[in-house]
Image (tube, grey):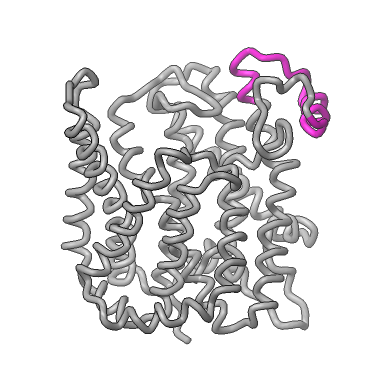
Amino acid sequence: MQRRYDLDWLRVIAFSLLILYHTGMMYVSWDWHITSAYQSESLKWLMQWVNPWRLSLLFFISGCALYFALQRYRSGVLLRLRTERLLIPLVFGILVIVPPQLFFEMRQAGESTGNYWQFWLAYLTPDHPLFSQHRTPLFGQMTWNHLWFIPYLWCYSVLMLLAQRLVAPLIRGLRYLTLPTLVLLPAGLLTLYGMVLKPYYPESHALFNDWYNHALYFTVFLLGYIFAGSDHVWQQLKNKQVPLLALAFCCYGLLMWARSLPDDLVLSPAEEFWGGHVFLGIELLNIWCWILALCSLAQRYANHNSRVLKYANTAVYPYYILHQTLTVSFGYGIVALNLKPWLEPTSIVVLTFLGCILGYEIIRRQRTLRWLFGLAPLPTSAPKIPNQVLSGSA
Protein backbone atom coordinates (compact mmCIF):
# COMPACT_ATOMS: atom_id res chain seq x y z
CA MET A 1 0.00 0.00 0.00
CA GLN A 2 1.43 3.35 -1.09
CA ARG A 3 1.85 5.79 1.76
CA ARG A 4 -0.20 9.00 1.62
CA TYR A 5 2.48 11.60 2.24
CA ASP A 6 0.00 14.36 1.36
CA LEU A 7 -2.08 13.51 4.42
CA ASP A 8 1.07 13.31 6.53
CA TRP A 9 1.97 16.86 5.47
CA LEU A 10 -1.54 18.10 6.19
CA ARG A 11 -1.42 16.61 9.68
CA VAL A 12 1.94 18.22 10.42
CA ILE A 13 0.84 21.61 9.06
CA ALA A 14 -2.47 21.51 10.95
CA PHE A 15 -0.73 20.76 14.26
CA SER A 16 1.90 23.43 13.57
CA LEU A 17 -0.86 26.00 13.04
CA LEU A 18 -1.90 25.43 16.65
CA ILE A 19 1.24 27.18 17.92
CA LEU A 20 0.52 30.27 15.82
CA TYR A 21 -3.20 30.13 16.60
CA HIS A 22 -2.76 29.84 20.36
CA THR A 23 -0.22 32.66 20.38
CA GLY A 24 -2.75 34.72 18.46
CA MET A 25 -5.31 34.09 21.20
CA MET A 26 -3.38 36.51 23.42
CA TYR A 27 -3.99 39.34 20.96
CA VAL A 28 -7.74 39.12 20.37
CA SER A 29 -10.62 39.80 22.72
CA TRP A 30 -11.63 36.14 23.06
CA ASP A 31 -11.29 34.57 26.49
CA TRP A 32 -7.94 32.78 26.98
CA HIS A 33 -5.36 31.96 29.66
CA ILE A 34 -3.03 34.93 29.04
CA THR A 35 -3.90 38.31 27.55
CA SER A 36 -1.52 40.86 26.05
CA ALA A 37 -1.90 44.61 26.29
CA TYR A 38 -1.67 44.66 22.49
CA GLN A 39 -5.03 43.79 20.97
CA SER A 40 -5.77 43.50 17.25
CA GLU A 41 -9.15 43.59 15.55
CA SER A 42 -7.63 42.75 12.15
CA LEU A 43 -6.02 39.60 13.60
CA LYS A 44 -9.54 38.34 14.36
CA TRP A 45 -10.22 38.02 10.64
CA LEU A 46 -7.26 35.70 10.20
CA MET A 47 -8.17 33.74 13.34
CA GLN A 48 -11.76 33.38 12.12
CA TRP A 49 -10.46 31.97 8.85
CA VAL A 50 -8.44 29.20 10.55
CA ASN A 51 -10.61 28.51 13.59
CA PRO A 52 -13.62 26.77 11.95
CA TRP A 53 -11.74 24.05 10.09
CA ARG A 54 -8.41 23.46 11.86
CA LEU A 55 -9.67 20.77 14.28
CA SER A 56 -12.18 19.29 11.86
CA LEU A 57 -9.27 18.78 9.47
CA LEU A 58 -7.34 16.91 12.17
CA PHE A 59 -10.31 14.62 12.86
CA PHE A 60 -10.71 14.00 9.11
CA ILE A 61 -7.03 13.03 8.78
CA SER A 62 -7.31 10.87 11.90
CA GLY A 63 -10.19 8.98 10.29
CA CYS A 64 -8.06 8.43 7.20
CA ALA A 65 -5.22 7.19 9.40
CA LEU A 66 -7.43 4.67 11.15
CA TYR A 67 -8.52 3.18 7.83
CA PHE A 68 -4.93 2.81 6.63
CA ALA A 69 -3.81 1.38 9.97
CA LEU A 70 -6.53 -1.28 9.76
CA GLN A 71 -4.97 -2.51 6.53
CA ARG A 72 -1.85 -3.41 8.54
CA TYR A 73 -3.06 -4.34 12.03
CA ARG A 74 -5.90 -6.38 13.48
CA SER A 75 -8.59 -4.44 15.31
CA GLY A 76 -7.55 -5.73 18.75
CA VAL A 77 -3.91 -4.77 18.21
CA LEU A 78 -4.89 -1.35 16.96
CA LEU A 79 -7.22 -0.77 19.91
CA ARG A 80 -4.41 -1.63 22.32
CA LEU A 81 -2.00 0.71 20.52
CA ARG A 82 -4.42 3.62 20.43
CA THR A 83 -5.37 3.13 24.07
CA GLU A 84 -1.75 3.04 25.20
CA ARG A 85 -0.57 5.93 23.05
CA LEU A 86 -3.54 8.21 23.60
CA LEU A 87 -4.78 7.65 27.15
CA ILE A 88 -1.39 7.42 28.89
CA PRO A 89 -0.25 10.81 27.50
CA LEU A 90 -3.68 12.20 28.37
CA VAL A 91 -3.41 11.24 32.03
CA PHE A 92 0.19 12.45 32.18
CA GLY A 93 -0.86 15.68 30.50
CA ILE A 94 -3.69 16.34 32.96
CA LEU A 95 -1.42 15.75 35.96
CA VAL A 96 1.83 17.33 34.77
CA ILE A 97 1.71 19.20 31.46
CA VAL A 98 -1.52 21.21 31.77
CA PRO A 99 -1.35 22.62 35.37
CA PRO A 100 1.16 25.42 34.54
CA GLN A 101 -1.45 26.92 32.22
CA LEU A 102 -3.85 27.44 35.11
CA PHE A 103 -1.00 28.60 37.38
CA PHE A 104 0.04 31.43 35.06
CA GLU A 105 -3.55 32.30 34.21
CA MET A 106 -4.33 32.78 37.90
CA ARG A 107 -1.14 34.75 38.52
CA GLN A 108 -1.86 37.18 35.67
CA ALA A 109 -5.37 37.66 37.06
CA GLY A 110 -3.85 38.54 40.45
CA GLU A 111 -5.21 35.46 42.23
CA SER A 112 -3.38 33.76 45.06
CA THR A 113 -1.39 30.68 43.99
CA GLY A 114 1.58 30.33 46.33
CA ASN A 115 4.69 28.86 44.77
CA TYR A 116 4.32 26.28 42.03
CA TRP A 117 4.86 23.29 44.34
CA GLN A 118 2.09 24.49 46.67
CA PHE A 119 -0.14 25.21 43.67
CA TRP A 120 0.43 21.76 42.15
CA LEU A 121 -0.33 19.91 45.40
CA ALA A 122 -3.53 21.94 45.71
CA TYR A 123 -4.34 21.14 42.07
CA LEU A 124 -4.17 17.42 42.89
CA THR A 125 -6.49 17.87 45.87
CA PRO A 126 -10.16 17.34 44.95
CA ASP A 127 -12.26 20.51 45.23
CA HIS A 128 -9.48 22.54 46.83
CA PRO A 129 -10.79 26.01 47.87
CA LEU A 130 -7.94 27.71 45.99
CA PHE A 131 -9.76 26.89 42.76
CA SER A 132 -13.32 27.84 43.69
CA GLN A 133 -13.51 29.99 40.54
CA HIS A 134 -11.91 27.37 38.31
CA ARG A 135 -14.05 24.25 38.58
CA THR A 136 -14.23 21.99 35.54
CA PRO A 137 -16.53 19.14 34.48
CA LEU A 138 -13.60 16.73 34.69
CA PHE A 139 -12.52 16.43 38.34
CA GLY A 140 -12.67 19.47 40.54
CA GLN A 141 -10.16 21.89 39.08
CA MET A 142 -8.38 19.30 36.96
CA THR A 143 -8.70 19.80 33.22
CA TRP A 144 -7.28 18.59 29.93
CA ASN A 145 -7.39 22.06 28.28
CA HIS A 146 -5.92 21.73 24.75
CA LEU A 147 -5.58 17.95 25.16
CA TRP A 148 -9.36 17.49 24.78
CA PHE A 149 -8.66 16.29 21.22
CA ILE A 150 -7.11 13.09 22.62
CA PRO A 151 -10.10 11.61 24.51
CA TYR A 152 -12.41 12.54 21.63
CA LEU A 153 -10.09 10.80 19.16
CA TRP A 154 -9.87 7.70 21.35
CA CYS A 155 -13.68 7.45 21.64
CA TYR A 156 -14.19 7.90 17.91
CA SER A 157 -11.52 5.31 17.15
CA VAL A 158 -13.19 2.77 19.43
CA LEU A 159 -16.59 3.40 17.82
CA MET A 160 -15.15 3.03 14.34
CA LEU A 161 -13.31 -0.18 15.19
CA LEU A 162 -16.60 -1.61 16.44
CA ALA A 163 -18.57 -0.39 13.43
CA GLN A 164 -16.08 -0.97 10.61
CA ARG A 165 -18.11 -3.73 8.96
CA LEU A 166 -21.23 -1.57 9.02
CA VAL A 167 -19.30 1.27 7.39
CA ALA A 168 -17.85 -0.83 4.54
CA PRO A 169 -20.93 -0.38 2.26
CA LEU A 170 -20.51 3.41 2.54
CA ILE A 171 -17.02 3.12 1.07
CA ARG A 172 -18.33 1.11 -1.87
CA GLY A 173 -21.17 3.58 -2.36
CA LEU A 174 -18.81 6.52 -2.84
CA ARG A 175 -17.93 5.32 -6.34
CA TYR A 176 -21.26 6.67 -7.61
CA LEU A 177 -20.84 10.21 -6.24
CA THR A 178 -19.62 13.21 -8.21
CA LEU A 179 -17.65 16.11 -6.76
CA PRO A 180 -20.71 18.40 -6.28
CA THR A 181 -22.42 15.62 -4.32
CA LEU A 182 -19.27 15.03 -2.26
CA VAL A 183 -19.33 18.73 -1.37
CA LEU A 184 -23.02 19.30 -0.74
CA LEU A 185 -24.18 16.04 0.86
CA PRO A 186 -21.79 16.11 3.87
CA ALA A 187 -22.28 19.87 4.25
CA GLY A 188 -26.05 19.37 4.32
CA LEU A 189 -25.73 16.66 6.95
CA LEU A 190 -23.52 18.87 9.12
CA THR A 191 -26.00 21.73 8.73
CA LEU A 192 -28.80 19.46 9.94
CA TYR A 193 -26.74 18.67 13.06
CA GLY A 194 -26.19 22.37 13.58
CA MET A 195 -29.89 23.22 13.39
CA VAL A 196 -30.95 20.38 15.69
CA LEU A 197 -28.13 20.30 18.24
CA LYS A 198 -26.13 23.53 18.30
CA PRO A 199 -28.76 25.69 20.05
CA TYR A 200 -29.01 23.20 22.93
CA TYR A 201 -25.44 21.90 23.29
CA PRO A 202 -22.88 24.73 23.16
CA GLU A 203 -19.24 23.83 22.69
CA SER A 204 -17.69 22.58 25.94
CA HIS A 205 -14.91 20.07 25.07
CA ALA A 206 -15.94 18.24 28.24
CA LEU A 207 -16.66 14.94 26.37
CA PHE A 208 -19.98 14.42 28.14
CA ASN A 209 -23.01 16.38 26.98
CA ASP A 210 -21.01 17.91 24.11
CA TRP A 211 -23.36 16.47 21.52
CA TYR A 212 -23.09 19.07 18.78
CA ASN A 213 -19.30 18.82 18.76
CA HIS A 214 -19.55 15.03 18.72
CA ALA A 215 -21.95 15.12 15.78
CA LEU A 216 -19.61 17.45 13.87
CA TYR A 217 -16.28 15.85 14.70
CA PHE A 218 -17.34 12.22 14.56
CA THR A 219 -19.02 12.77 11.19
CA VAL A 220 -15.86 14.38 9.83
CA PHE A 221 -13.82 11.52 11.34
CA LEU A 222 -16.16 9.01 9.65
CA LEU A 223 -15.87 10.86 6.34
CA GLY A 224 -12.08 10.67 6.60
CA TYR A 225 -12.31 6.92 7.21
CA ILE A 226 -14.59 6.19 4.25
CA PHE A 227 -12.84 8.62 1.91
CA ALA A 228 -9.52 6.92 2.66
CA GLY A 229 -10.90 3.66 1.30
CA SER A 230 -12.14 5.10 -1.98
CA ASP A 231 -9.79 5.80 -4.89
CA HIS A 232 -12.79 7.34 -6.68
CA VAL A 233 -13.00 10.17 -4.15
CA TRP A 234 -9.37 11.14 -4.54
CA GLN A 235 -9.75 11.08 -8.32
CA GLN A 236 -12.69 13.46 -7.94
CA LEU A 237 -10.55 15.77 -5.79
CA LYS A 238 -7.52 15.56 -8.06
CA ASN A 239 -6.65 18.92 -9.64
CA LYS A 240 -9.85 20.49 -8.28
CA GLN A 241 -8.11 22.84 -5.88
CA VAL A 242 -9.09 26.00 -7.82
CA PRO A 243 -12.90 25.53 -7.73
CA LEU A 244 -12.78 24.18 -4.17
CA LEU A 245 -10.66 27.10 -2.97
CA ALA A 246 -12.96 29.54 -4.78
CA LEU A 247 -16.00 28.08 -3.03
CA ALA A 248 -14.19 28.04 0.33
CA PHE A 249 -13.15 31.70 0.02
CA CYS A 250 -16.69 32.65 -1.01
CA CYS A 251 -18.05 31.01 2.13
CA TYR A 252 -15.44 32.73 4.28
CA GLY A 253 -16.18 36.09 2.66
CA LEU A 254 -19.92 35.72 3.26
CA LEU A 255 -19.31 34.82 6.91
CA MET A 256 -17.05 37.83 7.43
CA TRP A 257 -19.61 40.09 5.75
CA ALA A 258 -22.38 38.77 8.01
CA ARG A 259 -20.24 39.24 11.12
CA SER A 260 -19.42 42.82 10.11
CA LEU A 261 -23.08 43.87 10.09
CA PRO A 262 -23.90 46.41 12.83
CA ASP A 263 -24.98 44.98 16.15
CA ASP A 264 -28.05 47.19 16.24
CA LEU A 265 -29.38 45.94 12.89
CA VAL A 266 -33.11 45.32 13.26
CA LEU A 267 -34.49 42.13 11.68
CA SER A 268 -37.96 40.71 11.61
CA PRO A 269 -38.48 37.35 13.37
CA ALA A 270 -38.68 35.59 9.98
CA GLU A 271 -35.49 37.28 8.73
CA GLU A 272 -33.69 36.41 11.95
CA PHE A 273 -34.86 32.77 11.79
CA TRP A 274 -34.03 32.11 8.16
CA GLY A 275 -30.94 34.30 8.21
CA GLY A 276 -29.59 32.34 11.16
CA HIS A 277 -30.14 29.04 9.36
CA VAL A 278 -28.55 30.30 6.14
CA PHE A 279 -25.57 31.60 8.14
CA LEU A 280 -25.23 28.23 9.86
CA GLY A 281 -25.34 26.40 6.52
CA ILE A 282 -22.62 28.64 5.08
CA GLU A 283 -20.57 28.20 8.24
CA LEU A 284 -20.59 24.40 7.94
CA LEU A 285 -20.16 24.42 4.16
CA ASN A 286 -17.11 26.61 4.81
CA ILE A 287 -15.61 23.96 7.13
CA TRP A 288 -16.16 21.13 4.67
CA CYS A 289 -14.94 23.10 1.64
CA TRP A 290 -11.67 24.00 3.36
CA ILE A 291 -11.06 20.34 4.25
CA LEU A 292 -11.65 19.25 0.64
CA ALA A 293 -9.65 22.15 -0.80
CA LEU A 294 -6.67 21.47 1.45
CA CYS A 295 -6.81 17.75 0.62
CA SER A 296 -6.83 18.61 -3.08
CA LEU A 297 -3.92 21.03 -2.66
CA ALA A 298 -1.88 18.50 -0.67
CA GLN A 299 -2.60 15.75 -3.21
CA ARG A 300 -1.32 18.02 -5.98
CA TYR A 301 1.72 19.58 -4.30
CA ALA A 302 2.71 17.60 -1.19
CA ASN A 303 2.46 13.89 -1.98
CA HIS A 304 6.18 13.26 -1.45
CA ASN A 305 8.47 12.23 1.36
CA SER A 306 11.38 14.20 2.80
CA ARG A 307 13.72 14.22 5.78
CA VAL A 308 11.68 17.04 7.30
CA LEU A 309 8.50 14.95 7.07
CA LYS A 310 10.19 11.90 8.60
CA TYR A 311 11.23 14.02 11.58
CA ALA A 312 7.91 15.84 11.87
CA ASN A 313 5.75 12.71 11.68
CA THR A 314 7.21 11.51 14.96
CA ALA A 315 7.82 14.89 16.59
CA VAL A 316 4.38 16.40 15.99
CA TYR A 317 2.60 14.50 18.77
CA PRO A 318 5.00 15.57 21.58
CA TYR A 319 4.96 19.08 20.07
CA TYR A 320 1.17 19.11 20.32
CA ILE A 321 1.23 17.96 23.96
CA LEU A 322 3.84 20.51 24.99
CA HIS A 323 3.07 23.57 22.89
CA GLN A 324 0.22 25.31 24.74
CA THR A 325 1.87 25.04 28.14
CA LEU A 326 5.04 26.52 26.65
CA THR A 327 3.08 29.30 24.93
CA VAL A 328 1.24 30.24 28.13
CA SER A 329 4.40 30.03 30.26
CA PHE A 330 6.54 32.12 27.92
CA GLY A 331 3.61 34.45 27.25
CA TYR A 332 3.16 35.21 30.95
CA GLY A 333 6.79 36.23 31.31
CA ILE A 334 7.16 38.08 28.02
CA VAL A 335 3.91 40.07 28.24
CA ALA A 336 5.19 41.55 31.51
CA LEU A 337 8.32 42.90 29.74
CA ASN A 338 6.34 45.44 27.65
CA LEU A 339 8.24 44.67 24.45
CA LYS A 340 7.38 46.29 21.12
CA PRO A 341 4.18 45.07 19.43
CA TRP A 342 6.01 43.04 16.77
CA LEU A 343 8.70 41.67 19.11
CA GLU A 344 6.37 40.31 21.80
CA PRO A 345 4.43 37.73 19.71
CA THR A 346 7.51 36.88 17.64
CA SER A 347 9.44 36.05 20.82
CA ILE A 348 6.61 33.86 22.14
CA VAL A 349 6.32 31.90 18.88
CA VAL A 350 10.09 31.40 18.55
CA LEU A 351 10.51 30.35 22.18
CA THR A 352 7.55 27.96 21.92
CA PHE A 353 9.02 26.26 18.87
CA LEU A 354 12.47 26.10 20.50
CA GLY A 355 10.92 24.65 23.66
CA CYS A 356 9.11 22.00 21.61
CA ILE A 357 12.34 21.13 19.77
CA LEU A 358 14.32 20.82 23.00
CA GLY A 359 11.52 18.93 24.72
CA TYR A 360 11.22 16.45 21.86
CA GLU A 361 14.97 15.86 21.70
CA ILE A 362 14.91 14.95 25.40
CA ILE A 363 11.72 12.88 25.14
CA ARG A 364 12.80 10.75 22.20
CA ARG A 365 15.99 9.63 23.97
CA GLN A 366 14.31 8.41 27.19
CA ARG A 367 12.24 5.22 27.29
CA THR A 368 9.93 6.38 30.06
CA LEU A 369 9.33 9.76 28.47
CA ARG A 370 8.63 8.15 25.10
CA TRP A 371 5.96 6.03 26.80
CA LEU A 372 4.45 9.04 28.60
CA PHE A 373 4.31 11.06 25.36
CA GLY A 374 2.85 8.30 23.22
CA LEU A 375 5.91 7.46 21.12
CA ALA A 376 6.88 3.98 20.00
CA PRO A 377 9.52 2.25 22.15
CA LEU A 378 13.16 2.73 21.27
CA PRO A 379 14.24 0.35 18.49
CA THR A 380 14.92 -3.23 19.55
CA SER A 381 15.16 -6.51 17.71
CA ALA A 382 11.36 -6.61 17.60
CA PRO A 383 9.57 -5.04 14.61
CA LYS A 384 9.06 -1.30 15.04
CA ILE A 385 5.48 -0.04 15.28
CA PRO A 386 5.08 3.30 13.50
CA ASN A 387 4.25 6.28 15.68
CA GLN A 388 1.74 7.39 13.07
CA VAL A 389 -0.59 4.54 14.06
CA LEU A 390 -1.43 6.35 17.27
CA SER A 391 -2.65 9.80 16.51
CA GLY A 392 -3.89 10.56 13.08
CA SER A 393 -1.16 10.15 10.49
CA ALA A 394 -2.04 8.28 7.34
Q: How many marks?
A: 0
336 w.r.t. 354: above or below: above
In terms of depth relative to the viewer, which is nearer, 277 or 252? 277
Q: Where is residue 103 drawn, in percent x and y?
A: 68, 26
Q: Where is residue 237 drawn, in percent x and y?
A: 26, 72
| Corner quadrant of residue 378 | bottom right
The residue at the point 35 percent across, 38 percent down is 47
The residue at the point 43 percent across, 48 percent down is 17
| Corner quadrant of residue 87 | bottom right
177 w.r.t. 91: above or below: below
- Residue farthest toward the front in the current orientation of the protein: 270
Q: Where is residue 240 drawn, in percent x and y?
A: 20, 69
Residue 231 relative to residue 80: left or right: left
In terms of depth relative to the viewer, which is nearer, 353 or 136? 136
Q: Where is residue 82 drawn, in percent x and y?
A: 65, 66
4 w.r.t. 366: above or below: below
Residue numbers of the magenta segment:
104-126
Decide whether residue 162 is among the magenta residues: no
The residue at the point 56 percent across, 51 percent down is 149
